[in-house]
Image (tube, rainbow, N blue to C red):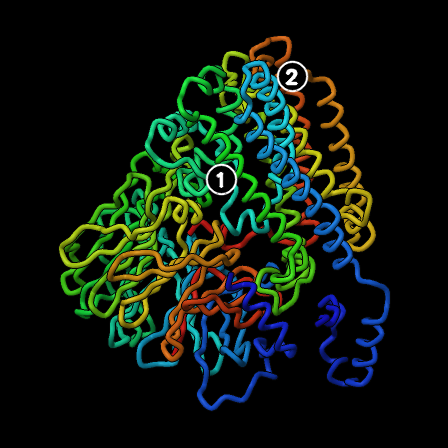
Amino acid sequence: MKRTKQIPPQTLDKSTWLRWPLLAVFALTLAACGKEPAEPKLLAHTAHEVIVPLYAALDAEAVKQRELSQAFCQAGEPDQQKSLQQQLQTQWRATMSAWAGVQPIGFGPLEEGNLRWKLQFWPDRKDLTRKKVEALISSDDDLTAERVASASVSVQGLAALEYLLFDASGSALQRYQDVEPVSRRCLLLQAIAARVQQVTHRLLSEWSGDINQPSYADTFSQPGADNDRYPDNNASIAALLDTLVVGSEVVKRNKLGIPVGKDVGHAKPYRLEAWRSQHSLALMQASVVTLEQLYRGNGGYGLQNYLLEAAKVDAALLRDIDESFKAVNAQFMLIEGPLFTQLKQPEYHATLTELHRRLNVLQRNLNKLPDSLGIKLGFNSNDGD
Amino acid sequence: MQRRKFLQLAMAGGALSVLPLAGCGPKVSQPQPLLLSGSDNGDQHTLCGWQLGQGERFRLPVAQRVHAPLMRPGSNEAVFVARRPGTLIYVVDVQEGIIKQQLSAPSDRHFYGHAIFSSDGRWLYVPENAYAEQGRGKIGVYDATAGFQRVQEFDLDGIGPHQLALMPDGFTLAIALGGIQTHPEHSRDKLNLDRMQSALLYLDTRSGQVTARFKAPHQHLSLRHLDVAKDGTVMVGAQFQSSANPDESYTGPLVFIQRGKHGLQALQASEEAWQAQQYYIASVVMNSSGTLAISTSPRGGVVNLWQVAEARLLKQYRVKDVAGAGYLPAEGGFVVSNGLGQLFKVSDELQLLEHAAATRWDNHLLVNV
């Protein structure tokens, strides 16, 4: 059933409605037949053309990763095994980058199903990943996707796979070879890769929907009083703004600021995301690409269009946001990875600090959007009482 | 998933009958309960009375943001207490929908957003911050039969009394002592995280003495909200001060029960279920028989349904920005409210009841039946 289009509350004048009921009904009919309101267009485009494709890309990479991990574990010859491990490492980087692309999206089944930690246990300050992965391999448990699903989050997900594929000791080929009749390390690798893909498949199917369930994309893009997640347009737009504000903060602080530290002497390379694979810089960029797609609309009617044309937000703020995205991207071009080693190079510190400064400007500009739309991000969740 | 089931039902029904809007709700023979809550409309703080099935009964603009409402026994009067560092209590006639009286805190004191009446409705006990005395926690005693004159105070030998409740004996107060020192000149900054001492206190209102003190099970857990069942079981909800422990991620329990002389007993839930609550419980409410309870976690956007006797989690539902909670005795279920203006019924499933447009329901909800 199609819902009646919502009229923005500020256009409703109560006395007019009471005095001129027929006129009001007529006006409502006109409004419903008039040009498409901006909010549904923005929300539908964002959900279907930006977010769902990101989840589809993640699931496609996770499928390849699951298949390659099986091929690797079935390889007989050491040379073949070595070559397949390298391919699997490359595939892990692709999967992880696709994950970094959905990671900033702060609403949807990922949050509601509490699945974030199941795909990536991070930050991991005490290297629980190593301890728990090795403990599970040494145990007598069956190493299946189901066992992984019920295990500690530190052995699930992409960080545990990274340990098994990139750790100097944990990924050594002879450790995959020296157990008969079958390598438990390989069983676990396959089980985790299979579990990751179960989760990415679930996320994609919930976002895109199927015959049995309405899609989350529709839930998000069709707000209404009967919608148990998004009672009005502002609730959906707030979720989108929250993603931009929090997502940019996570990139700035967690992915860059904490590892870089205040000077080279205080750099913390082990706090980098994906330090074992030295893939940190690409992941930061992938998250910024998503933030920018959510803002610019990835070729369609995005938040930027909406803010300018429909919400009439101050054009100067939109120019500032536009420029701060460009400034961050320009600074990325000056950095050659891997951050894991660059963090400790004195000549690199200023470049990284400048990236941090530019991310901070971007974050602060995005943080002005909620106020400019009269939207509050969270109410009770910011209460503190 | 219940959400889908619900949406499917709603769509199949077509008429979306779950949404009786103000003035056009279904005719019911039994009057539906009146819900009381603070709410924000835009930047305006208000006191709101909302009748289920009927919609808004009153909405009164006020200067200070309130935290928790409560009814004065045997009357039509409700009081809404300003949250910290607020200094006002609003006395509302819920039939007339008017503010009858406004009380002010003594100088150098502010309220914490909670209060409780004696069972005869005469005495109002109000947690206060004596911030000029290093934040000592006090319970101010106000006489409702004498224009809410402040007649006495009890010293708690501790910091940050928050929610309190009257025990079934009729004279003991159960008080959640949050342990966190704040001062109005420092906004809402927490000044003593390194030495906070949160506890569940019992105070005898006849002597004004603290008769028992149960310490929080972790240095940085702040016990903040509670409810009492008819059998005297007390349920307490905590908030973990993660800013005091940036390098320690706490995934332990946040809800406890306390009975008799036994210490706090943690309710049982998986690490994941606790983690989903994001360190923070906003409300805890038990049903009238004390068999079931819910707790709300706005930061995690979850509602937990608890089986009290076995101290275990039955269900965890997702509700964004959820905080207010109450019990609907006629329905045998709970009701929760959120910052999006929604009201949900919580039982063995989650059901959207109503949506109040342009309304942010504030932290606590009271069901007046």
Q: Residues within 10 Å of mark 2 (few under 14, many from 20)?
A: some
Residue denoted by label 2: A337
Pointer 1 indicates a residue of which chain? A
Left or right: residue A177 versus residue A9 is: left
Q: Nearer the viewer, residue A96 or A269?
A: A96
Left or right of A338, for residue B45: left
Indicate left or right for A208 with B197 as reference.
right
Label 2: state its secondary structure.
Answer: loop
Residue type beneath disc 2: Gly
B340 relative to B94, above or below = above
Q: Are marks 1 and 2 on the same chain?
A: yes
- Is A64 drawn above or below residue B136 in the view shown? above
Q: Position of residue A226 (x, y in %)?
A: 61, 69
Query: In the image shown, does B184 or A174 lie closer to the viewer?
Result: A174
- Residue A280 visible from this viewpoint: no
For this rendering, which residue is in front, A152 or B305? A152
Q: Quadrant of residue A150?
A: top left
Question: Residue B148 location in percent, x, y?
Answer: 33, 70
Q: Is residue A95 above or below residue B160?
A: above
- Label 1 vs label 2: CA separation? 26 Å
Callout 1: SS: helix
Query: In the image, residue A116 lies at what x, y percent?
Result: 52, 42
Q: Image quadrant for the C terminus of chain B?
A: bottom left
- Residue at image x 49%, y 54%? B301
Point 75% across, 69% down: residue: A5
Q: Can see residue B315?
A: yes
Residue A374: image location, x then y, percent: 67, 54
User: Which residue is label 1 attached to?
Assistant: A117
Please name the residue shown 25% across and 47% down the image.
B158
Q: Which one is in front, B11 or A321?
A: B11
- Quarter of the view holding residue B189: top left
